[in-house]
Amino acid sequence: MDALGRILQQKRVAHVVEADIKSYFDTVNHAWTIKFLRHRIGDERVIRLVIRMLKSGIMEDGLVHATERGTPQGSILSPLLSNIYLHYVLDLWFSRRVRPACHGEAYYFRFADDFLACFQYKGEAERCRQQLEDRLEGFGLRLAAEKTQCLEFGRFARENAYKRGTKPKEFTFLGFTHYCGRTREGYYKVKRRTSRKKLGQSLQRFTDWARRARSVLRKGEMLRLARARVTGHLSYYAITDNAAPCRLYLRRTERILFTWLNRKSQRRAYTWSGFVQALAWVGWPTSRIRIDLNPCRRAEAR
């Protein structure tokens, strides 16, 4: 995230290719996976072990179904094999084919199956978008058309969009929506906020947990576990320029917790003032920024 922010802030980037692979973990090709592994692994015993894990299948309603493609869900090997697969399919392809063919600057970022590319020129970004679809299809993968786009993003994207009478475009990467903002002095700055989808999912998971926990946990234990869940969310999302969504998450989780604590019995467990004291007792977290990802920080220090 920090490297992406600095590239968007400090380099000559004007266009971003945002892409998403459709059902990636369910469509990984076994034959290509084994072929990629044999580039670095010479011991056939290891290869046979990986093949057995790939074909172990999944269990549904007590029955085991063999799989011909994809990585087993929940397997300790799935994240590693998926990274190896995309290393050969995307990482090496971009560094050896796409970037050398570009006249302008080109950058590429990937974490697991989430990836995007940044370009200086629009033509090169659109060409990469077209080549990307053919590249993935050659290895049994498909792009999610509704989540794949080539958009203008950079120092002049906001002004150009306003001249056309439209809003500047945004893109989502690793749970954050990236958008073109400004510093207090009016200069261009890349900013991030929690994506609406991820915020909604986090609140729904917290609600589901509180609904289940209220019938099996004591009030004090429920408060402590709720604090741990909220702290985990903030440890990832409480970054520079994302204070407002974090405050919203805190307010919503407090209301959810207050509601389900008071549904433990027919008699109300807490008044709001008593609930606030209980939050202070367990050390309820605040929405302070935990990770500094300000791409302008080094320039401001100078």
Image: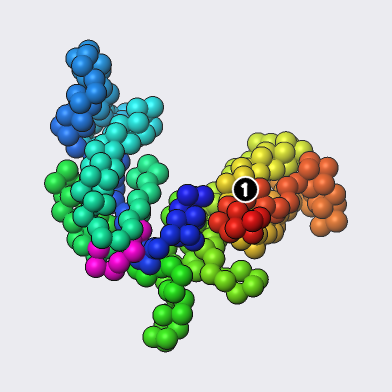
What residue is drawn where x is 30% and y is 61%? 104
Span highlighted in magenta in the image = 117-124
Q: Is residue 1 above or below residue 51?
A: below
Locate residue 33 relative to residue 198 in the image: left or right. Answer: left
Give the mark count: 1
- Could you tell me which secondary element the residue under label 1 belongs to? loop
Image coords of residue 213 (percent x, y): 63, 41
Quarter placement of the C terminus: bottom right
Q: Is residue 220 above or below residue 189?
A: above
Front-lying residue, 71 or 184: 184
Image coords of residue 66 (percent x, y): 21, 30
Residue position for label 1: 291
Locate residue 33 relative to residue 169 in the image: left or right. Answer: left
Say what amino acid the circle numbered 1 marks: Ile
Q: Is residue 90 visible?
A: no
Image coords of residue 65 (percent x, y): 23, 31
Front-lying residue, 143 or 5: 5
Examine the structure image and report whether residue 294 is included in the region drawn in magenta: no
Q: Is residue 267 above or below residue 242?
A: above
Rendering colour mode: rainbow
Front-lying residue, 63 or 117: 117
Q: Residues within 10 Å of mark 1 (few under 14, many from 20)?
A: some
What residue is drawn where x is 33% and y is 36%? 83
Locate residue 15 relative to residue 67 in the image: left or right. Answer: right
Locate residue 18 relative to residue 56 in the image: left or right. Answer: right
Image coords of residue 154 (percent x, y): 43, 68
Examine the structure image and report whether residue 120 is included in the region drawn in magenta: yes
What residue is drawn where x is 43% and y is 59%? 11
